[in-house]
Amino acid sequence: MNRSSALLVLFGAVAFWTGEHGLAGAADRLQLRPLAPEVPQYAKIEFLITGLGAYQNPFDPEEVAVDLEIRTPSGQTLLLPAFWYQPFERRVSADRRPADWVYPSGPAHWRARFTPTEPGLYQAMARCTDRHGSRTSAPVRFTCQKSDRRGFLRTSSKDPRFLEFSTGEPFFGIGQNLAFIGFEQQITYAKAEKVFQTLRAMGANFLRIWTCCEDWALAVEARKNAWGRSWSGPGPIVPMPGQVPDKPARRCVQLGGQHPAQAAARPPNPLAVRPNTNYLLTGRVLADTDGQLTITAGSLRLGEPVRLKKNAGWTNFRQEFRTAAEQDFLPEVSFRWEGGGRAWLDEIVLAEAAGGPNLLADADPNRPVRTYYNPVDCFMLDVLLEAAEREGIYLQLCLLTRDLYMSALQKEGSPEYQQAIRDAKKTFRYAVARWGYSTSLAAWEYWNEMNPGLPTDRFYDALGQYLEKIDIYGHPRTTSAWGPAPKDWRHPRLDWAQGHHYLRPADKEKAHDEAAVVLERTALLRQHAPNKPILLAEFGLAEDNWQRSRWMQQDKELVHFHNCLWASALSGAASTAMFWWWELLDQMDAYRHYRPLADFLADIPWTTDHLQPAKAEVQETSVQVRVVGLQGHSGAYLWLQNPQSAWYPTVVEKKQLAAVSKAVLVLPNLQPGTYQVRWYDPWTGKRLSQSEVQAAQPPVRIPIPSFPRDVACKLIRTGQAASD
C-alpha cells in the first residue's frame, strides 16, 4: 500500500464503501439532506452532505472546507462549518470493564449540526472549497417550531457579572470538576451518565470537563499513540530507513537494534471488535537480516509468521483471522521479530475483511498530532453532551492540549507561535462544527493551566476574533493558568475570569479556613474583572506536592466541601467553587450537599436586582460570626458561619463547638420596606423559622436562631415602606 492510500485509510476515506456511498468525482454537485423536516427552537437538526471527493486529511480546512450557508426567517445569513464524521455504535455493560463498547457503524461522511434560535422557515445550502475551487448544493428548507427551551448560556445583558440563557432567565452554576472521563478511568463514560443523573437530582447543573487528556482519558486532539504514552516517550518509532534527502521525513516502527525485538500496539482506547467476524491485518515489513515476523493478539496468533530475506526490500503482509463467538475486544496486537538484526514496520491497518475503517489508526507513526481529532473520543464527547442535555447539565469544555502548544508560545513573533494560532483555529473550527450546536455547552476553555508568564495575549486575541466569526452561537470563552493571571482576567476577548486554588500545608494557618480563602480568591478575581462572570474553576484540599490531601477522607461530613460551596455561592461569583477531587466526591456521595444550596439559590434574582456584597454583622455574641451574602433592591441572601466550624479545627483539631445563641443580625443599609425573614439549615435545607420585619429606620436588627456551625437567611421584600 502506498503512502496516499494509507492516509486515506487512516482518515476513514476507505469507509466510503461500494454502493450508494461510492466515491464521488470532484465535478459532481454536492448533495445536502436534512435528517428531519422540522426542529424545535433551540434543538439540534443534522444534515448529511455527500458528493465530495476523497481527501488525504478531511480535518484540514486548508485542504477542504465544507460549510453550510443558512438563511434565517428574519433574513440573516449564517455561515456554519461542517465536519468529517465517523459514526459509531455503542453498547454499555454494567458488569464489564471497559463498560463501553464502541465500534464504527457505517461509512465516514460529512455532517453539519445546527440549532435554530428563531421559529420559522429556514433555507440551507452546502458549499465545498478545495483545490478544484468551490461547489455548492441545491438549497433545502426546514422549519423551526417555537418551543419553551431556554437556549444558550451567555453573559447577562442586564448584569455582566452573572449568566443568563437566551431567553433572559438567570443561570447560576452549581457544580464541580469531572475532568478525566475515559474507558479505564474511575469515571467511565457509562458512569459519567449516571453521575449526570445524580447531579440533576441533587440540584447541580455545571461541570468542568477536560477534552484534552492526552492518552489517559477523553482527548479530542492528542498524541493517542499506540506505541508509547505521553509519560514514557514515543516507543519504538524511528525515522524510516533509506529516505531520500530533502523529502518530508517519514517514520516507522523498529524491532530490534536499540529497541526490543517485540513491540505491542496498545491503543489508548480499547480495541473493540465484532464477535464471529473475519478481520484482516495488513502492512509491510523491511529487514536487514533473515528472519520472521510473528503477530499475535493475546493468545491468538494472527496468521502464519511472515518470513523475510535480508535486503529483500519492503514486503507486504496480509494476516486474516476470525474473532471468537463472544469476543468484544481484541488484546494488544504484538509484533515479534525473530532472527536478530532489525526489522521495520509501516502502514499497519486492521479492518474487517469485508472492508471498513482502520481500527489501528493510533498505530500510524505518521499521523499528525495537532489538528487530528480522534474519532472515538469525538464520538464519546457527542455522547456526553447528549447526556448533559437530557439532564440539564452545562459543560465547560477544556479543549486544547496545553503541552502540544506551550513550547510554541514562548516568542510572540516566531513562526511556531503563528503556527500554533493556525492549528488552534483549525481545532476550534472542528469543535464549533461538531459541538457548537449544543445548548449544554456552557463555555469554551482554551487550556488547562497555561504558563501565566507566556505572551499569550496575541493568541487569545487572534483565536477570540476567529470564534467571533465562526461560532454563530457566541459561546463564552475562558482559559486558566497555573497561577494568578490578571492579564487573562482582563483580556477583552476572554469572557469569563477563571482562577484555580488549592489549600496546602505550605500556606500554614491561612489554609485552615477554607471559606476565608474562597472569599479572598473571588475578591482578587473581581478586582481584575469587575464586569465579567468570575469563577473558581478548581479548588480543593491538597498536599504541598499538589496531590490529594490525606485529610479529605477523614473529613467524613465533607465540612470543607460544604463551607466552600456556601461561601462561593454568595461571594458574587457566577458559580460555586468547583472542586477537583471528583473521584473522592463520588465515593463519599458528596452530591447530597448540592440540594440544600440549590434550593436556597433557586429564586435569587441574579441578573435583575443589582446585587452587591451585603453589609451585615452579628452582634451580642462572644463568637465572631462570619457573614457572607448579597443584597439588592428586593432582598438579601446570607450565610452565617462560626469560623470554628472550618475544616481544620473540626477535622484535624477535633474541637467541640459551642452553639451560637441569642445573637442578633444587624443590617445597616437594607432598603426600607416589609421583609419576610426565613432561616434555613444549610446542611439539610430545612426551614427553621419564618417571621416578618419592618425596615424603616436603619439599622435593622433580627434575632438569629441558635446554631452550632452555620445558618442561612433570606430576607424577601414583600412591601414598600409607608414613605416610598
Image: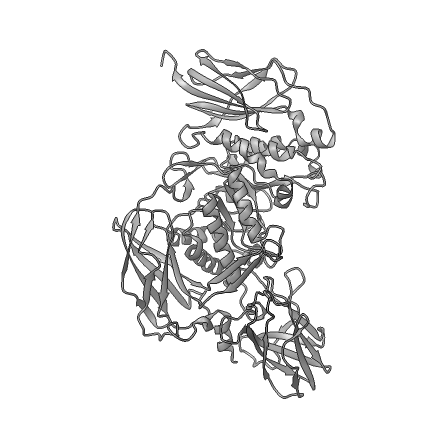
Q: Is any part of residue 172 visible from this angle?
A: yes
- In the image, what residue occupies the spot 39% across and 51% down? 468
Q: Residue at x 47, y 27 (%)?
A: 612
Residue 385 to residue 227: above or below: above
Does residue 284 appear to the left or right of 338 in the view shown? left
Farthest residue to the front: give it. 325
Q: How many marks?
A: 0
At a point 43% along the width and 55% down the height, the residue shown is 432
**In the depicted structure, whether residue 342 falls above or below residue 272:** below
x, y percent for residue 372: 51, 64
Percent across and percent down for residue 434 are 43, 57
Viewer-closest of 171 and 59: 171
| Colour basis | one colour
Horizontal and vertical percent for residue 555?
Answer: 69, 35
Quick check: can you spot residue 477? no
- The x, y position of residue 540, in whole percent, is 63, 40
Left or right: 295, with 87 as reference point:
right
Name the quadrant containing residue 69.
bottom left
